[in-house]
């Protein structure tokens, strides 16, 4: 994590990132700041909103399968607006073993 650049809001809990060697770009929603140059947290906030709504349908997940479900959320989020059936069919055909 040292040397990583992290975009965060101004929540105090993120102060420790500096101690860990990260270079945080911070935007302060409490000061009506929502972007500073290219730094913003809108994308990750939109993803987590999407993921929380999707995962809530399961009424909890076991720890050993959580990351798989989260990766599915990532795939669905990154391909939203696309025909998932067509996309998945294409992927299966590309990776089909004879």
Image (cartoon, rainbow, N blue to C red):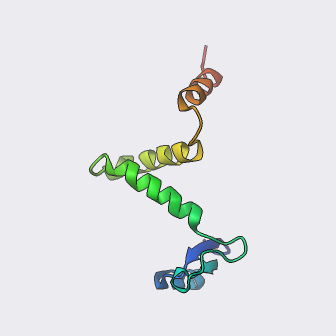
Residue 75 vertical position relative to residue 83 in the rendered view, above or below: below
| Residue 52 sits in quarter | bottom left
Residue at image position (48%, 85%) is 12
> Where is residue 9 shown, x and y percent of the image?
54, 77
**Residue furthest right as drawn:** 37
Residue at image position (51%, 63%) is 45
Taking depth in this image into account, of 20 and 78 the one nearest to the observer is 78
> Where is residue 20 shown, x and y percent of the image?
57, 80
Number of callouts:
0
Residue at image position (48%, 47%) is 73
Inspect this view and state whether residue 89 appears: yes
| Residue 79 sits in quarter | top right
> Where is residue 43 shown, x and y percent of the image?
58, 61
> Where is residue 80 shown, x and y percent of the image?
56, 43
Taking depth in this image into account, of 89 and 65 the one nearest to the observer is 89
Residue 44 left/right relative to 25: left
Residue at image position (26%, 50%) is 59
Residue 52 vertical position relative to residue 96 in the rendered view, above or below: below
Q: Quadrant of the N terminus?
A: bottom right
**Residue furthest top as drawn:** 98
Q: Quadrant of the C terminus?
A: top right
**Residue furthest front as drawn:** 32
**Residue furthest left as drawn:** 59
Inspect this view and state whether residue 22 appears: no
Taking depth in this image into account, of 46 and 1 the one nearest to the observer is 46
């Amino acid at each position: 994590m040292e040397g990583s650049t992290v975009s965060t809001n101004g929540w105090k809990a993120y102060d420790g990132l500096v101690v860990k060697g990260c270079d945080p770009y911070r935007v302060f929603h409490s000061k009506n700041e929502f972007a500073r140059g290219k730094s913003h947290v809108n994308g990750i906030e939109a993803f987590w909103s999407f993921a929380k709504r999707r995962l809530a349908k399961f009424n909890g997940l076991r720890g050993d399968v959580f990351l798989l479900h989260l990766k599915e959320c990532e795939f669905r989020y990154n391909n939203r607006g696309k025909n998932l059936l067509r996309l998945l069919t294409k992927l299966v055909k590309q990776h089909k073993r004879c």
